[in-house]
Image (tube, rainbow, N blue to C red):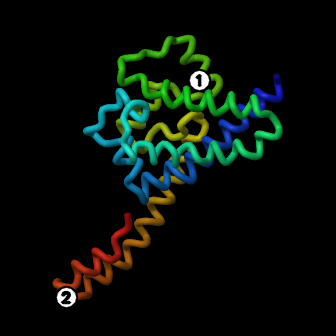
Amino acid sequence: MLEAIAVAWFLLVIGDFFSTFCYHIPEHVFGNLHLKTHHSSKKNFRHYAILIPNFQVLLDGILGALPYLLVAIPLWSVSPAGVIGGLAFGQFHVWWRHTSVLGWQTPQFITSLCRILYITTPERHWLHHQKTSLGYGDIFTFFEQPAKGWLRWLRLARFQRLIPCARMACFTPSSSAKCVRKRCKLG
């Protein structure tokens, strides 16, 4: 039993790490799939990724879940029950963290327990929906500070790649400057 709990916890921590740092944050900087399907101001999150058969929403969910699944493969031989439990808890947490839009208010004792375990509550995740620079770490809140640093670093790296393009555009005739800016644009 302890082995299954340890495997489930390990799966969730490592999966959340890779999902946050290899998919979620780079998607916020360089992509638009996640932003379009998860952070659009016109989005109704009541049935997000549960009842809506939208390919882009499903693709975003699959790409976010892929790190968990890849971590699950080697852990299966250690504890299949732990892997199943970890993946089930992860899916439950996806549904639970999107309940705040339905008017759900997390009871104080659960909020306190989540704070002790560093687990993201629906209210904390809703902050991320409202302001995309807050609330990183889909399951665990201890990833938020490193994630903010990674977000800043990736944005800086992206910005520094744009600076030479802007300089080139300044030294070209106006008719070709638009073309240069278009070619240099990222994301």
Q: Quadrant of residue 131?
A: top left
Can you give x and y, in whole percent of width and height, for residue 49 in the image? 42, 35
Instruction: State the residue position of label 2.
Output: 173
Instruction: State the residue position of label 1.
Output: 115
Can you give x and y, in whole percent of width and height, for residue 164 in the image? 38, 79
Of the 4 image quadrants, the one containing the C terminus is: bottom left
In the figure, 57 relative to 181: above or below? above
Crowd tier of the residue under label 1, counting other residues whose Cα lies within 10 Å: few below 14, some 14–19, many 20 or above? some
The kind of secondary structure element at disc 2 is: loop
12 with respect to 108 (left or right): right
Of the 4 image quadrants, the one containing the N terminus is: top right
Q: Earlier in the sequence, mark 1 or mark 2?
A: 1
In the figure, 152 relative to 125: above or below? below
The kind of secondary structure element at disc 1 is: helix
Q: Are marks 1 and 2 in contact (CB under 8 Å)?
A: no
61 with respect to 103 (left or right): right
Q: What mark, if any, has residue 75 been given in the picture? A: none
Label tally:
2
Amino acid type at circle 1 is Arg
Can you give x and y, in whole percent of width and height, for residue 52 in the image? 36, 35
At horizontal 54% and vertical 28% (from top left) the residue drawn is 93
* CA distance separating discs 1 and 2: 57 Å
Crowd tier of the residue under label 2, counting other residues whose Cα lies within 10 Å: few below 14, some 14–19, many 20 or above? few
In the figure, 145 relative to 109: above or below? below
At horizontal 48% and vertical 27% (from top left) the residue drawn is 95
At horizontal 38% and vertical 67% (from top left) the residue drawn is 186
Of residue 65 and residue 119, the one placed in the foreground of this image is: 65
Q: Quadrant of residue 172?
A: bottom left
At horizontal 45% and vertical 53% (from top left) the residue drawn is 27
78 with respect to 107 (left or right): right
In the figure, 46 relative to 129: above or below? above
Residue closest to the far front: 53
